[in-house]
Image: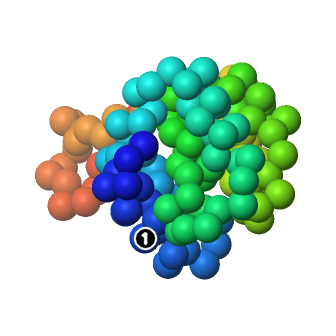
């Protein structure tokens, strides 16, 4: 990822006061969406490299989060679980963001829902009765 691509992600990181806010901004970032088109193997390799050294710039500080979100956009649960084995001593939000991405990747519960249909109620005016005022009907439950 080049410097121009990471600039909006770095800005998002700078203004984020919570990890979830950063994730929401990175998911909408076009550069992150483009990055997600690369293979999970490539993204994991870049993630691993970005975690090795202490970041000295804002751009370098946001890179692991960019790669995590890109992997999650690929819907690759195996790659996210593999990322959980990486050490991130210089990135305080790494585990929290990773846990959130894994938890929200798939539905947390699956089940059947049955719908009970209510009986149909038909309203008709009685033909053998006197004229009916507005709002007065004979109700037949079917």
**Residue on which disc 1 sits:** 11
| Horizontal relation, residue 78 to residue 59: left or right | right
The image shows residue 45, relative to residue 68, as above or below, that is above
Q: Residues within 10 Å of mark 1 (few under 14, many from 20)?
A: some
Q: Residue at x 64, y 72 (%)?
A: 18
Q: Residue at x 74, y 47 (%)?
A: 52
Can you say which quadrant of the picture contains the N terminus? Answer: top left
Q: From the viewer's perspective, tell me whether residue 132 is left or right of residue 1.
A: left
The quarter of the displayed image where residue 129 is located: top left
Q: Residue furthest left?
A: 131
- Pick the residue in front: 83 or 97: 83
Q: Position of residue 92 (x, y in %)?
A: 77, 65
Task: Return the x and y of residue 4 as percentages of the image width and height.
Answer: 31, 55
Q: Percent x, y for residue 109?
A: 75, 33
- Residue at 42%, 36% (x, y): give it: 35
Viewport quadrant of the C terminus? top left
* 88 vs 113: above or below: below
Q: Say what secondary structure mark 1 lies in.
A: helix
The residue nearer to you, when weighing 108 against 7, is: 7
């Amino acid at each position: 990822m080049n410097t121009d691509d990471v600039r909006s992600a770095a800005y998002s990181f700078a203004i984020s006061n919570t990890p979830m806010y950063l994730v929401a901004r990175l998911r909408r970032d076009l550069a992150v969406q483009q990055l997600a088109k690369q293979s999970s193997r490539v993204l994991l390799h870049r993630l691993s490299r970005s975690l090795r050294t202490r970041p000295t710039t804002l751009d370098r500080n946001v890179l692991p989060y960019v790669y995590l979100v890109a992997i999650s956009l690929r819907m690759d649960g195996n790659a996210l679980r593999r990322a959980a084995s990486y050490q991130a001593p210089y990135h305080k939000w790494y585990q929290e963001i990773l846990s959130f991405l894994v938890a929200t990747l798939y539905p947390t519960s699956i089940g059947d829902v049955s719908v009970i249909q209510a009986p149909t109620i038909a309203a008709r005016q009685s033909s053998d009765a006197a004229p009916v005022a507005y709002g007065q009907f004979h109700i037949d439950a079917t």
